[in-house]
Amino acid sequence: MWFDEKSMKLNRRDFAKMGLIGGAALILPSSAKAQTASFSQPLAFPPVLSPTSVDATTDYYNISMQAATKQIVPGGNTTIWGYNGIFPGPTIKARRNRRVVVRQTNNLSVDTSVHLHGGHTPASSDGFPTDVIMPGNFKDYTYPNDQLPATLWYHDHTMDFTGRNVYNGLAGFYILTDDFEDALPLPRGRYEIPLVIQDRTFNQDGSLYYDNAGQNRELGFIGQQILTNGVIQPYHYVERRRYRFRLLNGSNARIYELALSNNQQFIQIGSDGGLLSAPVARSVITLAPAERVDVIIDFAETAHGTNVVLRNLAGSEATSEVMQFRVMPRRYGKDTSRIPPVLRQVDRIPESSASVTRNFNLNMDVVMGEAVHSFNNQPFDPARIDANPQLNATEIWVFQSQTQGEHPIHIHDISWQILDINGAPPEAWDFGWKDTFLVSSGNRVRVIGKFTDYTGDYVLHCHNLEHEDFAMMARFRVS
Ligand code: C2O
Ligand code: CU
């Protein structure tokens, strides 16, 4: 069955309890079953976008949001909505403190809004859900990049339709770096690879299947196949040396538990908001929607000819394998990279510096037989201000799950640190900067952050995109 995913068990129990919701959605149309053989296609790399002009302070980019067709399923054509018609979108490379201005032109037939996820962005460029670009219009988004370097991504954020729009392809990498990071001896160039993992379901003719009613509205839409950089279960030839992979879960709702088939460990060097203080070895990495991990995988000890599979322990059959690394000898000389024991010092924000604590309960209700997700039982209303932090205040936000579901909570504007989860300090890999935190069933997660630089309206929301679209979002105004 397509929904027997480990990460969904709690949700399914919840669903069964509800009884009422989405009986019809349990049955997928029989056409929605196009399957592709594993590891039959090479990994793809989204192109790096070139600026249309540059000046002393700023790189200017033009992007057209448009429909296009792409061959994803062998023998079928898939209509996608892409930035410049590409899925995943082109990668923007930015430098710390050098401004980027992106002119986004909407050549689709629906409203859009663009958010830079993880960006410390003035409110007017943050992609507020109702701040839409209508078809035929454009908007210039300004990104100052006055923040720690990290793996960011830009994606659609349109009120009520983020799930559909991102699913159709509106997402791309935005990679921010600086001189400090460049000076570290980490793998770079062809050995530094961004990987966005997404799940999709295809109809027999190759078209995308999407539905957000019933069970999909309650649990979030879970696709039947796993794509990396837009390719279903690709392979990639790797040399016997170190690689740096910037992993992003770009799926609407699926949570991955990533592991390597040869039981080798990942060395995690970064999280959502950039480098950790020190590297951490991990065998299994849980990656919830919108979370990023920056990892080193060292293939030096792996024999030539070995195939190492990036597995998803939370999946089953077709969704238990993400991609395959085919190990071959080194081609371009000695591996001069290293993993330094100290990466970038993360200064922990003292709990005593917080002046305000805010509580957000995570709730689900059923209205007219359909799930409604919310914070504090108040479904999103873009006209209502739910929190009003003062500029430069340090605050503690507390997320208490009161549902059986899994909720990756994302807060716009600033980066946060996790204080504790159910009262216990976070694991070493969660000790750095975060903007998305998985709040599992019944859990209580406390985070601390400082509202620097910008006033204005932002949102926080669940990054299960169907939960977001069905109202688990709140507005806050920094003043
Ligand atoms: Cu990645 Cu408000 O979103
Ligand atoms: Cu949620």
Image (tube, helix red, strand yellow):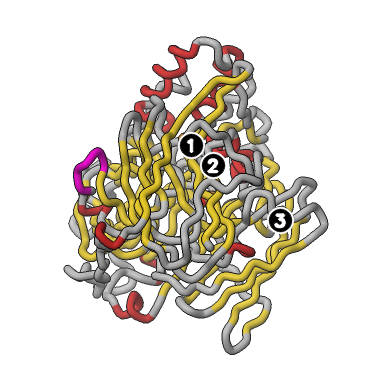
SS category of the residue bearing label 2 = strand
Specify whether residue 386 is in view.
Answer: yes
Q: Is residue 219 left or right of residue 63?
A: left
Is the Cβ of the residue at disc 1 closer than 8 Å to that at disc 2? Answer: yes
Magenta part of the protein: which range?
Answer: 421-425
Q: Residue 473: which numbered mark, if any?
A: 2
- Nearer to us: label 3 or label 2: 2
Specify whether residue 45 is in view.
Answer: no
Residue 85 in the image: above or below residue 360: below
- Nearer to us: label 3 or label 1: 1
Label 3 environment density (alpha carbons within 10 Å; few <14, some 14–19, many ≥20): many
Residue 113 place in picture, x, y as percent: 67, 53
Q: Is residue 299 magenta?
A: no
Q: How far apart are marks 3 and 2 (CA)?
A: 25 Å
The secondary structure that dominates the magenta segment is loop
Label 2 environment density (alpha carbons within 10 Å; few <14, some 14–19, many ≥20): many
> Farthest residue in the bottom direction?
56
Hey, what amino acid is under mark 1?
Phe
Q: Distance between the residues labelled 3 and 1?
A: 32 Å
Q: Quadrant of residue 6?
A: top left
Which residue in the protein does label 1 denote?
A: 375
Q: In this view, does 278 lie to the left or right of 118?
A: left
Hey, what amino acid is under mark 3?
Met
Give whichever of discs 3 and 1 has the lower sequence position.
Answer: 3
